[in-house]
Image: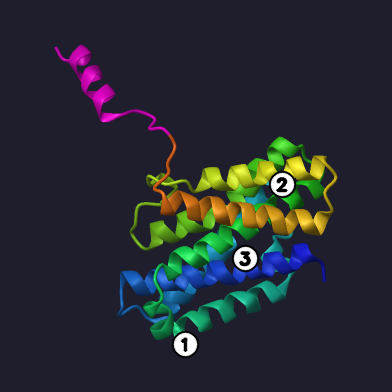
């Protein structure tokens, strides 16, 4: 069993947990089916989009039944351990961070293995990581984390680029996997800890100036 496959299983497990926990945080009366559905879609969303865009069939979760079992295990753990996990601060954030870091590198590596250019691999790595969380947030009626004021998808893109640079320097593959994943985790933690964000696309001040010119 390759380290890439192990990372994909772990990423799937953590994303399934984050999806199920997101439902529980939104509605304490939600039933198991709702939590299971959200956990399932969160876990497969990014990888499915990646495979569709790359034309890689059958989809990874359809081809490998073990991924389905991993998703069910993640959902079950979320339900059984919910009271304990609820006491931990930022539990959903933790599982989401682990999920995006793992899926970024797995998605990047898979795209490279299919013969695509490194630039495409970095983008597909980011898509693999963030789209499951976007779908999760939409299903739980939240503003997708992609659009919030925090470094999220950009951390994945930088992590993918970091992985590609190390690969170009001929760093041993398994070592590159681990180092790049840690890089994304630390970048995400630092962004939240120090409230880091990218420059605004359009500030309120600029919008105010613009409105004066467009007023009749």
Task: Residue under label 2, please give it.
Answer: 163
**Residue closest to the eye, 170 or 51:** 170
Placement of 130 over or under 118, stated as above or below = below
On-image quarter of the C terminus: top left
Asked if the residues shown at circle 1 and circle 3 are in contact, with their CB atoms under 8 angstroms apart, the answer is: no
Task: Residue under label 1, please give it.
Answer: 80
Which residue corresponds to the image point at 39% horizontal and 56% vertical from the top-left?
Answer: 138
The local secondary structure at tag 2 comes to helix
Find out whether residue 74 is within the magenta segment. Answer: no
Q: Is residue 14 visible?
A: yes
Asked if the residues shown at circle 2 and circle 1 are in contact, with their CB atoms under 8 angstroms apart, the answer is: no
Q: Quadrant of residue 7?
A: bottom right
Q: Is residue 56 visible?
A: no
Q: Quadrant of residue 61?
A: bottom right
Q: Where in the figure is residue 164, as x and y percent of width and height? A: 74, 42
Which residue corresponds to the image point at 45% horizontal and 47% vertical from the top-left?
Answer: 146
On-image quarter of the N terminus: bottom right
- Kindly report the distance in space between the C-alpha atoms of the residues bearing marks 1 and 3: 20 Å
Which residue corresponds to the image point at 77% horizontal and 44% vertical from the top-left?
Answer: 166
Placement of 200 over or under 158, stated as above or below = above
The local secondary structure at tag 3 comes to helix
- Which residue is at the far bottom? 80
Find out whether residue 215 is within the magenta segment. Answer: yes
Q: Where in the figure is residue 128, as x and y percent of width and height? A: 61, 53
Q: Residues within 10 Å of mark 1 (few under 14, many from 20)?
A: few
Which residue corresponds to the image point at 62% horizontal and 65% vertical from the top-left?
Answer: 11
Residues in magenta, as a range: 199-216
Task: Residue under label 3, please give it.
Answer: 11
């Amino acid at each position: 069993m390759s380290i890439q496959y192990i990372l994909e299983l772990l990423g799937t497990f953590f994303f399934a947990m984050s999806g199920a926990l997101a439902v529980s945080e939104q509605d304490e009366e939600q039933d198991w089916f709702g939590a299971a559905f959200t956990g399932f879609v969160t876990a497969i969303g990014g990888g499915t989009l990646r495979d569709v865009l790359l034309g890689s069939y059958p989809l990874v979760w359809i081809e490998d039944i073990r991924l389905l079992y991993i998703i069910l295990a993640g959902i079950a753990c979320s339900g059984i351990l919910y009271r304990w996990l609820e006491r931990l601060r930022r539990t959903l954030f933790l599982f989401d961070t682990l999920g995006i870091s793992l899926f970024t590198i797995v998605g990047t590596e898979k795209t490279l293995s299919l013969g695509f250019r490194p630039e495409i691999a970095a983008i597909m790595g980011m898509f693999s990581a963030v789209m499951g969380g976007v779908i999760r947030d939409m299903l739980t009626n939240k503003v997708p984390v992609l659009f919030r004021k925090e470094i999220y998808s950009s951390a994945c893109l930088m992590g993918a680029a970091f992985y590609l640079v190390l690969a170009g320097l001929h760093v041993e593959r398994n070592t590159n996997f681990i180092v790049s994943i840690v890089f994304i985790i630390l970048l995400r933690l630092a962004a939240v800890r120090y409230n880091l964000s990218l420059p605004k696309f359009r500030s309120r001040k600029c919008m105010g100036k613009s409105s004066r010119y467009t007023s009749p």
